[in-house]
Image (cartoon, grey):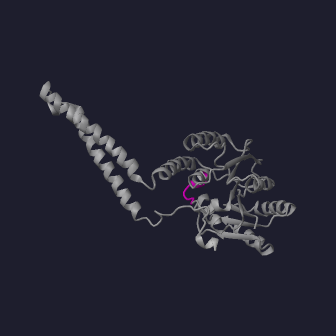
Amino acid sequence: MDISVVIPLLNEEESLGELYGWIERVMEANGYSYEVIFVDDGSSDSSWSIIEQLSQKDQRIRGVRFRTNYGKSAALYCGFERAVGNVVITMDADLQDSPDEIPALYKMIVEEGYDMVSGWKRTRHDPKAKTLPSKFFNATCRWASGIRLHDFNCGLKAYRNKVVKSIEVYGEMHRYIPILAKKAGFGRIGERVVTHYPRKFGVSKYGWERLLKGYLDLVTVMFVSKYGRSPMYFFGGAGTLMFLVGFISVVWIIIQKFTVGNPLTNQPLFYLSLVAILLGVILFLAGFLGELINRNAPERNHYFIDEEIDVKDRV
């Protein structure tokens, strides 16, 4: 199969029929074999009923319905699990992403050799309350990850199938899929300017709490990707540094007591040094405990193997 289209949605009953008709026209015009996977993230309207009706008319439509609202990352994760196409396309269900972009995204993956291509909504039809925080957020992501993308959070993306099978998204991690893909060894990440349409139906699900959660998840992604397998490198290193600073300060204060006669307990530095030593020991123990937990983790020796040549292949 050429393409799997994964569409997470929440209360988008007005747009689903029109969206699928648009996707169908694009696919048939280009001769692609495809499937469309709708993931209903706990909608309270008739979205699921519409998906059921569409699936009865076309067997290429698949659907997943959550019992409650788990978030976009959970919806994408379930869609990625079920996708079988060589190229996986994700888009939002609100008709702001254009299915007309699918052929160009597909060619960038198949013909130009990209592992992942992210859309860039250079011209956005969203309120300032959404676009201004987004610009700041994207600048932070570029600085933290070193990936030169203008729009990390664009819903319209294309992936090689093995990319989506190698990453795990949860929380608000869907914003950082390019970072997760890079950490998993998929370094060919491209970008394409895409058309962004004004919202035709419904209301935006964006909220300020998502921005805060997004930054917390960014810290999590950067930390876990660097120190997840060896937490002692971070906690042990920081603990050792704190311990040495505190210990050297205590030695200096003791030397001053015997040479100058300054009382130990009259100096704030003495108490700060003791705190530094204590924090150093605590951080070192945290790193040690992290290593013990990591040693017992079932995925500690889980590595992404791209290709393998075995002896039996030569027989």
Q: Quadrant of residue 68?
A: bottom right
- Decide which of 129, 164 is in the foreground and name it: 164
Residue 123, image x and y in percent? 75, 41
Q: Quadrant of the N terminus?
A: bottom right
Query: Above or below — where is 15 with respect to 1?
Result: above
Q: Is 65 rendered above or below residue 98? A: below
Residue that sits furthest to the top in the current view = 260
Rendered position, 92 above or below 132: below
Q: Which residues are magenta?
A: 168-175
Of residues 69 and 239, the one drawn nearer to the viewer in this rendering: 239
Residue 98: horizontal and vertical position, in percent?
78, 53
Q: Residue furthest front?
A: 315
Residue 82 horizontal/vertical position (percent): 65, 69
**Residue drawn at x 32%, y 44% as measured from the top left:** 240
Nearer to me, 73 or 243: 243
Q: Is residue 174 magenta?
A: yes
Image spot of residue 289 (x, y percent): 34, 57
Q: Which residue reaches farthest right?
A: 29
Q: Could you say which quadrant of the image residue 269 lies in? A: top left
In this rendering, position of residue 243 left or right of residue 36: left
Is residue 295 on the magenta stretch? no
Where, by quadrant of the figure, is residue 63 drawn? Answer: bottom right
Q: Would residue 26 be found to the left or right of residue 190 on screen?
A: right
- Left or right side of 220 for 85: right
The residue at 73%/55% (across/down) is 109
What residue is shown at x 55% (from left), y 49% (from top)? Answer: 214
Q: What count of labels does the image hold? A: 0
Prevailing secondary structure of the magenta residues = loop
Q: Quadrant of the C terminus?
A: bottom right
